Amino acid sequence: MKILGIETSCDETALAIVEADGSAASPRFQIIAEVINSQTKIHEKYGGVFPMMAKREHAKNLIPLLKELNFWRRNKGSGIRNKEEINKILEREPELLEQFLEYIPTIKKPNIDAIAVTSGPGLEPALWVGINFAKALGLVWGLPVIPINHMEGHIVSALIPKQVTGDELRVTSSTIDFPALALLISGGHTQLILVREWQKYEIIGETRDDAVGEAFDKVARMMNLPYPGGPEISKLSSMARTHKTSPAKYILPRPMIKSDDYDFSFSGLKTAVLYTIKKLDEKTKQTDEWKRELAKEFEDSVTEVLTSKTKKAIEEFGIKTLIIGGGVIANNHIRKSFTKMISEFPECSLLIPDLSLSTDNAVMIAMAGYFNYLNKQKVGSEFIAKGNLALN
Ligand code: KG4
Ligand code: ZN
């Protein structure tokens, strides 16, 4: 079956069509088309994402992106039925409504079987745009609309592990061994989740304050680096790693590394960075080196805490597959460190998403849609945006 995925939970507007078949235990996925529009440039000026601004951008971008998917055949017929209902569904998104009524009647009902859309967690105004768009499309085309937990999307994103270049299709049969452990590291979440079978999620640990991506972004802001800070910190620290000009000059804590649980805390680490910056003398501040070294020490601290807690969980629960998802796994050092760590566990395999699927995208939403579609209990059209939607 083919699923249209829609993602608007934060600052990426993304659409994808994914072909899926096989059972939940052995699914196969193939990306048919994928488009994404990042609002980073818009939010950069403000150093963060403003929900209402993100919502407006999503509303503006969805129809142009839908066109760009290039999956549609022209329709010579005229008008759409259900116009009144569409008006009602999209009344809060006038710009989207106008484009919708103009474009949708010009294309035929596509050869897709369901629509999957992120319903949370995320910024509620932003989530609503995607949800209303999905519901309006579902109504016009007579397709089921499946609400997706964004974090479940990040978990399954690792099931398409490699990007094949050129015209080759990215196809993979994704049978994994259970129990699996999912480490989710994004801008809003840091969680360790025990997965005994698909769609059975048990959170065994999570952050008590800042998420790891949030800590990256805040530390970057302290260093006057642009938003989003994660990739900037990553760039600086990899310079420090390759130059090896000096030994680490700054020492930061490894919060909760020895605690007797699977929880995390990154707020103290962020404060430690702040104090370190405050103590810098004027001469040092004039150089760039301190940024590189401090970025590296910060990245080391985060990496050691993440790998050490994950290792403990692999041992305790006899984990057979480690899955890592969320934007922070785009970080090169963290990727490498986990690859190295997993070599200590020959009975456990590691699944990391392709770089392009590490940060927010709609492919993962369509993929999660397939699991939800197979698990009929999780499909329902009466749903709303939930900013703090939990995995269960
Ligand atoms: O999963 P994601 O795209 O959005 C959320 O669901 O939150 O994750 C975004 C987070 C941001 O905090 C961003 O700074 C971080 O992922 N990030 C990185 C890197 N690329 C993105 N953090 C560290 N190193 C990176 N290379
Ligand atoms: Zn995300």
Image (tube, rainbow, N blue to C red):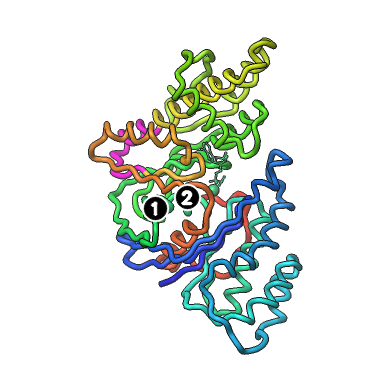
Labelled disc at residue 356: 2
The residue sitting at the bottom extreme is: 77
Residue 134 or 380: which is nearer the viewer?
134
Tell me where the magenta segment starts and ends, as one range. 310-322
Local SS, label 1: loop
Q: Seen in the image, is 326 located left or right of residue 55?
A: left
Mark 1: give few (<14), some (14-19) or many (20+) Cα within 10 Å.
some
The 10 Å Cα crowd at callout 2, few under 14, some 14 to 19, many 20 or more, is few
The residue that appears at 33% across and 36% down in the rendered structure is: 314
Badge 2 amino acid: Ser
Nearer to us in this view, 213 or 167: 167
In the depicted structure, whether residue 36 falls above or below residue 252: below
Give the residue drawn at x 35%, y 46%. 351
Q: Is residue 211 visible?
A: no
What residue do we see at 46% from left, 75% from top?
113
Which percent across, then down, holds residue 42? 70, 48
Tell me: is circle 1 under 8 Å from ligand 1: no
Q: Which residue is mark 1?
A: 163
Q: Amino acid at mark 1?
A: Gln
Do the numbered discs 2 and 1 sit on residues whose CB atoms are within 8 Å?
A: yes
User: Can you see residue 306?
Assistant: yes
Q: Residue at x 51, y 78 (%)?
A: 110
Say which label, 2 or 1, has the lower sequence index: 1
Mark 2 sits near ligand 1, with its Cβ under 8 Å away: no
7 w.r.t. 242: above or below: below
Name above or below for residue 126 compared with residue 77: above
Query: Image quadrant of residue 96?
Result: bottom right
The residues bearing labels 2 and 1 have C-alpha atoms spaced at a distance of 8 Å
